[in-house]
Amino acid sequence: MIIGIVCEGSSDFPVLEAVVEAALGDGHEVRYLRPETDALFRPGGWTAVKAWCEEHASWLSDFMTVGNIDLLIIHVDADVRRHVPELKKKKGEPTTQDLCDTIKGWLKLRQSAKGRRVLIVIPAQATEAWLVAAQGGATPDLEKEAKPVTRLVQRKLVSTIGGKPDKSPAVYRDLATPLRSHAAELRGVLRELDHFMGKLEAGRERTGARRSTPSRRAPPPALPRGSADVL
C-alpha cells in the first residue's frame, strides 16, 4: 500500500511516518508530497497545506490514481485553528472538528470514494506532543499543551537557534523511533493519536490491504515512567 503525506513542515513527516508504520506495519511505501524536498524553496505551514489542497481539489482522484496512492494523509496542527480566516467568522472557540470540516472544504470532499481515501490528521495541539509522550510518562493532558516542543527543548532533545526551537527533520526522526515502538501503548492515553491510528486501520480495511508483517527487531525498551512531567 502507498500512503502519501501532505504536512505543514519537514519535521512533521518523520513523526507521521512513525505512526503510519506503527499502525500498519512495515512494507508500506510512505511518500513525502508536501513540502517539496527539491531545491526550490517554498513556504511551509498551514497556509501551504491549504494551497496544496486547493490546487489539487479538482483533480485529486486523478492525482491519486496516477500516483498509485492508496491513502492520502493531510496534516495540520490544531493550534492553527485560531488563525484560519474561515474559522475566525465562527462564534466562540473553534474546535478541531471545525478545522477538519474546513480542510474538507479546501479539498472539496464529499461522501465519495475520493473522500474515503483521504485521512485528515489534526494533532492537538502539535505533533511534538507525541514525541514527548514517547519519552515516557504520557498523560491525556499532554495533547492539550500549546507548545509541547518546549519540553523537548528543556530536556535538551531539541536545540535552539536565535531563541527558537531548531526543528531539524534528522533530530525529529531520531525522536520518532520510540514513538514507532510504543504507539500501540500510547494510543490508550492520547486521544488524537488513537484517532489517527484508528483512521489508518480503517483506511487499510477499505483498500483491502493487509497489515504487513513487522520486520524482526529486538523488543523495544519499556517506556520510562514519569519523565514527561519533568520540564
Image (cartoon, rainbow, N blue to C red):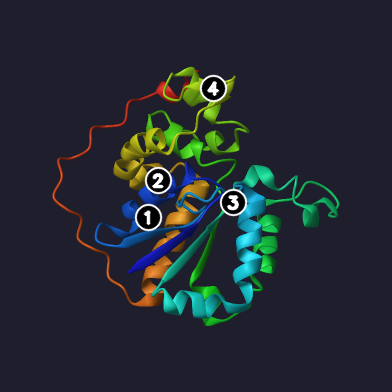
- Residue at image position (13%, 50%) is 216
| Residue at the spot of label 4 | 161
Q: Which numbered disc, 4 or 3, marks the residue that appears first in the sequence? A: 3
Of tags 4 and 3, the one toward the viewer is 4
Marks 1 and 3, how far apart in space? 16 Å
Marks 3 and 2, how far apart in space? 15 Å
Marks 4 and 3, how far apart in space? 24 Å
Name the mark on residue 4: none
Of tags 2 and 4, the one toward the viewer is 4
Of tags 2 and 1, the one toward the viewer is 2
| Residue at the spot of label 1 | 20
Marks 1 and 4, how far apart in space? 30 Å
Label 3 neighbourhood size at 10 Å, few (<14), some (14-19), many (20+)? many
- Residue at image position (25%, 57%) is 26
Q: Quadrant of residue 225?
A: top left
Q: Are marks 4 and 3 in contact (CB under 8 Å)?
A: no
| Residue at the spot of label 3 | 76
Q: Which numbered disc, 1 or 4, marks the residue that appears first in the sequence? A: 1
Name the mark on residue 14: 2
